[in-house]
Image (spheres, rainbow, N blue to C red):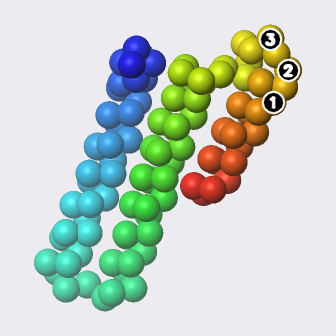
Amino acid sequence: MSHTIKEKAKLLGRVRRIKGQMEAVERALEAEMACGEILQLVASIRGAINGLTVELIEDHIVHHVVDPNKEPDNERAKGAADLIDVVRTYLK
């Protein structure tokens, strides 16, 4: 997966931020914070994980299926672009 190696620093940065968010949940639970505040922290983690997932799926499509910007077949290029848009929308 050479594309993940090229994006390694960016992906690891995202993972480390998610790790920090998880540690914040742990601290909040230990401090017996209100459940609403903890749920807000968990919701932010879910959004961060969805963002990471979208990035990984999009990169997979572009590098292993069809790159819509380089595909000469317009129908295949549109199909790949549509799939990327659906993934982005679904995981928002």
Q: Are marks 3 and 2 in contact (CB under 8 Å)?
A: yes
Neighbour class for label 1 at 10 Å: few (<14), some, many (≥20)? some
Q: Position of residue 4 (x, y in %)?
A: 40, 23
Tag 1: amino acid: Lys
Label 1, on which residue?
78
Q: Position of residue 61 (x, y in %)?
A: 58, 29
The outermost residue toward the left is 30
Label 3, on which residue?
72
Q: Quadrant of residue 76?
A: top right
Q: For mark 3, give the secondary structure.
A: loop
Residue at 73% from the left image edge and 23% from the top image edge: 68
Tag 3: amino acid: Pro
Name the foreground residue: 45 vs 20: 45
Residue at 49% from the left image edge and 53% from the top image edge: 50
Which quadrant holds the C terminus? Answer: bottom right
Q: For mark 2, give the secondary structure.
A: helix
The outermost residue toward the right is 74
Q: Are marks 1 and 2 in contact (CB under 8 Å)?
A: yes
Q: Is residue 66 toward the left or the right of residue 37 in the image? A: right
Neighbour class for label 2 at 10 Å: few (<14), some, many (≥20)? few
Neighbour class for label 3 at 10 Å: few (<14), some, many (≥20)? few
Residue at 69% from the left image edge and 40% from the top image edge: 83
Q: CA distance from mark 3 to mark 2?
A: 6 Å
Name the foreground residue: 26 vs 64: 64
Which quadrant holds the N terminus? Answer: top left
Q: Position of residue 9 (x, y in %)?
A: 35, 26
